[in-house]
């Protein structure tokens, strides 16, 4: 089972990551202002990860592949790590879709 991890950055803002069973970071939220915002972001991530059309696949300038997740209003709510292949990126998306609905929340703040 995966987990959402809430952390506080040195700048004072918060961030949410979805991690796999092995601890790999699959998806990272934008910077957030409060823990309440983190909880709301987690609920959005749980919802939008189940909609395949919310995943936008991209290629970075160094040719590594990644994706970002957008909400209905077009706002980016999460971005992935970089992947060496389209297969690895697609497998990560499938893993996120499987883990996110039931991932527990770990507050590290």
Image: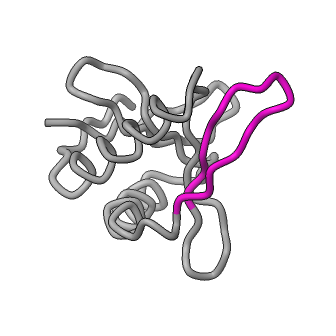
* For residue 83, side relative to residue 93 (left or right): right
What colour-coding does the image apply? one colour
* For residue 47, side relative to residue 89 (left or right): left
As drawn, the residue found furthest toward the bottom would be: 73
* Residue 38 drawn above or below residue 72: above
Instruction: Name the image quarter holding residue 75.
Output: bottom right
Look at the image and tell me in which quarter the C terminus lies.
top left
Look at the image and tell me in which quarter the N terminus lies.
top left
Predominant secondary structure, magenta span? strand
Residue under the point 18% across and 44% down: 104
Residue under the point 70% across and 31% down: 11
* Residue 6 drawn above or below residue 78: above
Query: What x and y, as percent, mark residue 83?
Result: 57, 25
Query: What x and y, as percent, mark residue 91?
Result: 37, 37
As drawn, the residue found furthest toward the right would be: 61
Residue under the point 67% across and 75% down: 74
Q: Nearer the viewer, residue 33 or 81?
A: 81
Q: Is residue 92 magenta?
A: no
Instruction: Name the image quarter holding residue 66.
Output: top right
- Which residues make up the magenta segment? 55-69
Number of callouts in the render? 0
Query: What x and y, as percent, mark residue 59?
Result: 74, 38
Q: Nearer the viewer, residue 98 or 14?
A: 98
* For residue 79, side relative to residue 60 (left or right): left
Query: What x and y, as percent, mark residue 82?
Result: 61, 27
């Amino acid at each position: 089972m995966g987990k959402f991890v809430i952390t506080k950055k040195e700048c004072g803002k918060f961030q949410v990551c979805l991690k796999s069973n092995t601890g790999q970071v699959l998806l990272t939220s934008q910077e957030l202002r409060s823990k309440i915002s983190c909880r709301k972001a987690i609920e959005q991530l749980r919802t939008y990860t189940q909609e395949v059309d919310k995943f936008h696949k991209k290629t970075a300038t160094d040719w590594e592949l990644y994706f970002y997740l957008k909400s209905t209003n077009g706002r980016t709510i999460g971005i992935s790590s970089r992947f060496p292949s389209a297969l690895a990126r697609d497998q990560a998306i499938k893993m996120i879709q499987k883990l996110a609905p039931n991932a527990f929340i770990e507050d590290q703040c």
